[in-house]
Image (cartoon, grey):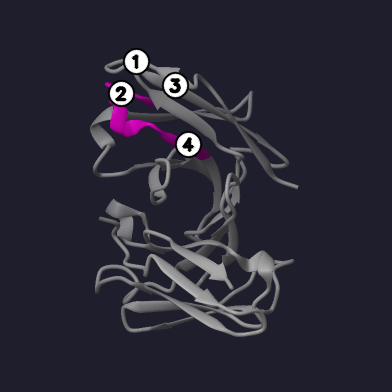
């Protein structure tokens, strides 16, 4: 059974850097075909794909956020880390860690989500 | 403005069927068979209910079905039950640059 768990700060100040960690269980980030990434959802609004890291170090970023994002894998810890620079109140959202299996483009497993608020 | 267009709301009575649409463009739904649908109850994470247009993950009720015509995908829920009341969101692969895009979500009310 695959599970994902997000961790990180729930409150950041404007202009600060957000670092979120996703811990994968029941599979490995280095398994062939595995991708782990992030989808966010502002309160009451739509889902938005943010970034993804595949098992082969292929990283994908949302074009609208790309300049502010970095996604990395910590294979020994079976974790994926997302960094978002220059946080703004509009980035306040629940950030979900998601699992994808190449070559499908479907998020088949989701973490419970972590609500991040950007406020001074 | 979401990349895929969904009606904000839909409704039906128990036992009835309801269809939710998801309209894209010639850059996504029209050319890729990677349409997915997610069900989200309040305060919980989305749950995958349809992938690759019309496939159901193990454990998802047969009452959920998906289809696609041109640049519009549809989710049909038959035999509506009260527990089907939720927000339904569609997504589509949109090429290597945009990767996956979502619809704005449709809030389904079971009257």
Specify the label residue A87 is tagged with.
2
N-terminal-most mark, 3 or 1: 1
Q: Are marks 3 and 1 on the same chain?
A: yes
Quarter of the view holding residue A19 = top left
N-terminal-most mark, 4 or 1: 1
Report the chain holding disc 2. A
Q: Are marks 3 and 1 in contact (CB under 8 Å)?
A: no
> Which quarter of the image is occupied by the C terminus of chain A?
top left
User: Element type at marker 1?
Assistant: loop
Residue at horizontal 23 percent and vertical 31 percent from the top: A67
Q: Nearer the viewer, mark 1 or mark 2?
A: 1
User: How far from the left and from the top, in percent, is residue B61?
Assistant: 70, 73
* Residue assigned mark 3: A19
Nearer to me, B69 or A30: B69
Nearer to me, B63 or A73: B63
Report the chain holding disc 3. A
Report the chain holding disc 4. A
Q: Are marks 3 and 2 on the same chain?
A: yes
B15 w.r.t. B104: above or below: below
* Residue assigned mark 1: A13
Quarter of the view holding residue B3 = bottom left
User: How far from the left and from the top, in percent, is residue A64?
Assistant: 24, 42
Mark 4 vs mark 1, CA separation in Å: 16 Å
Q: Are marks 3 and 4 on the same chain?
A: yes
N-terminal-most mark, 1 or 2: 1
Specify the label residue A108 is tagged with.
none
User: Which stretch did the figure color magenta?
Assistant: A83-96
Q: Residues within 10 Å of mark 4 (few under 14, many from 20)?
A: many
Q: Are marks 1 and 2 in contact (CB under 8 Å)?
A: yes
Is residue A102 covered in magenta?
A: no
Q: Nearer the viewer, mark 3 or mark 2?
A: 2
């Amino acid at each position: 059974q695959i599970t994902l768990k997000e961790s990180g700060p729930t409150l950041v100040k404007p202009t600060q850097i957000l670092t979120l960690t996703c811990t994968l269980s029941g599979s490995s980030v280095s398994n062939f075909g595995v991708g782990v990434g992030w989808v966010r959802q502002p309160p009451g609004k739509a889902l938005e794909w943010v970034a993804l890291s595949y098992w082969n170090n292929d990283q994908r970023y949302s074009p609208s956020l790309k300049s502010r994002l970095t996604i990395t894998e910590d294979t020994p810890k079976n974790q994926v880390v997302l960094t978002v620079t220059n946080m703004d109140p509009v980035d306040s959202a629940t950030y979900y860690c998601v699992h994808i299996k190449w070559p499908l483009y479907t998020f088949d497993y989701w973490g419970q989500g972590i609500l991040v608020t950007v406020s001074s | 403005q979401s990349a895929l267009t969904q009606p904000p709301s839909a409704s039906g009575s128990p036992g009835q069927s309801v269809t939710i649409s998801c309209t894209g463009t010639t850059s996504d739904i029209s050319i890729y068979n990677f349409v997915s649908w997610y069900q989200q109850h309040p305060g919980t994470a989305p749950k995958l209910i349809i992938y690759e247009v019309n496939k159901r993950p193990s454990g998802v009720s047969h009452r959920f079905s998906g289809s696609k015509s041109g640049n519009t995908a549809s989710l049909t829920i038959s035999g509506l039950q009260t527990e089907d009341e939720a927000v339904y969101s569609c997504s589509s692969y949109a090429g290597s640059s945009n990767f996956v895009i979502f619809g704005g979500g449709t809030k389904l009310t079971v009257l």
